[in-house]
Every structure is written in C-alpha cells, then in structure tokens.
Image (cartoon, rainbow, N blue to C red):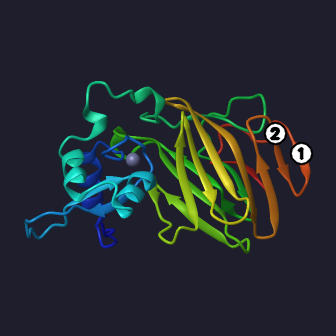
Amino acid sequence: MPSLPELTAEQREDIRRICGFACVRCGVTIYRYLALPTDKHADEPIGTLLCPTCHGLVEEGRLTPAQVCSFHANPVVRQRHFARDRLPFSNELPQLIVGGARLLRDTPIPVTVEGEPLLIFAPPRRGNGATRISVRLGGRDGTPEQIVDGNEWLPTNGSWHFLLRGDRYSIMAARGDGLAVLRIVSRSRIAVEHLRTTIKGRRVEVTPDWLEIDGKRYVDRISSGNLIGLEV
Ligand SMILES: [Zn+2]
C-alpha cells in the first residue's frame, strides 16, 4: 500500500476522524497514512491509518487489501469491545512518569538535548482523539531523526521498528541501541519506561526513576509546568 505524502492538513484530519484516530485494525495511535485500495476515482485521496506493525503485515502479504478495506469500514476503536483505557485516548495533556518520584504535569517537552526535543506530548487537536506523541532520537551517527511526528510514523526504510507489547509502545533502532519505550499507564498518564539515545554527541538515558546525561545521573531534575522540563 503506498503512503500518501501529499495530503493536506484537512485531508489528514478527515482520515484521522474516519479511522477513529488510530490504526483501523488494532487501535494503536502511532500510524502511517496509507492509500486505501479502491475502484473509485475520486478527486480526493482515500486514505486509511495503519500502525507500523499492521502495515508490515500488508507488505508481507499476510493482510490482503480486501481485509484492510473491511477494517477501514469498521475501525476497531469504534467497536464496543475495544478497551480504550489501555491506549492514550485522552483530551488532556498527559501526566508523565519520568526521571524521578514527582509526577510531571503540564510539561509538553520533558527534555531537550542540544535543542532537540526527544519527546513531545500534546492533547489532540479539537479536543478529540488521541494524545499527540512525537519522538526524535539520534540515528546511527547521532544525527537527530524525527521518527514519530504528531503520531505519524515517518521511517520508511526499516531503520526503526515499532512494537506494541502489552501496554507499551516500543520504538527501537534496527541497528544500534537507540530506543524509546512508553508505557500507557492510563488514558492520560504515560511513563517513559526507557529511552536511550546518542544525539549530537550527547549520551542520554531516561527511566521513570532517573535521567542520565553523559554518564551523570540525575533524579527529579525535570520540572513541571514549563514548555520544556529540562534543557541539557
Ligand atoms: Zn495496527
């Protein structure tokens, strides 16, 4: 399934709304915008949302275009049995468990390293949908790479992997040891379970309990109520 790079902001919004702000098959809120196989020749692109895992199944031929169309017609998040509480379907900026004992509140960007925001959290646009998550980590040579931008999964060359394991979103470098694991504690509470990257020559590791920069460990150094909780 080809991706839809030329979408306008309005078309993206339509697709998100139609799909329920998540992968139509599994409900993960990290996704790609993909062209839906269709016979119609409408002017507007008809797109759907699939998470990297479900998109991988399509690429491997384990999920047929017809199956994707039927998931699109009846997105999983709209089904009654779907458990929304294990995924970040919140209208508020989430509280964060990261780097110490204090719960981080009202802080969209917990940490920047050399001006690079590793994680950005934002409430959904128009107060409806899922927490917007952005992830930026160092690539193999430490150059910053945007991996997730407002819930959109950007890598197309297999350089990063995504996995939903239980209540965790795991993002891992295909090579090297870069990773970001976010645990969805509840709709509006997210724990940075583990983040590890080398970016612009700085080595960073973050857990719920501490933060380590260039080998030096800090606890409770990220402050609540600021746009950026800690700049290093
Ligand atoms: Zn999926």
Q: Residue at x 68, y 66 (%)?
A: 175
For residue 226, what is the image quadrant?
top right
Task: Residue 210: give its label.
Answer: 2
Is 125 in front, or is 37? 37
Categorize mark 2 by other alpha carbons within 10 Å: few (<14), some (14-19), many (20+). Answer: some
For residue 165, what is the image quadrant?
top right
Classify mark 2: helix, strand or loop.
loop
Q: Which residue is mark 1?
A: 217
> Measured from the top left, where is residue 6 in percent x and y?
30, 73
Above or below 141: residue 218: above
Residue type at the position of mark 2: Trp
Q: Residue at x 63, y 63 (%)?
A: 174
Q: Is residue 164 left or right of residue 49?
A: right
Q: Is residue 38 left or right of residue 134?
A: left
Above or below 116: residue 76: above
Categorize mark 1 by other alpha carbons within 10 Å: few (<14), some (14-19), many (20+). Answer: some
Residue type at the position of mark 1: Arg
Q: Residue at x 69, y 73 (%)?
A: 143
Classify mark 1: helix, strand or loop.
strand
On-image quarter of the C terminus: bottom right
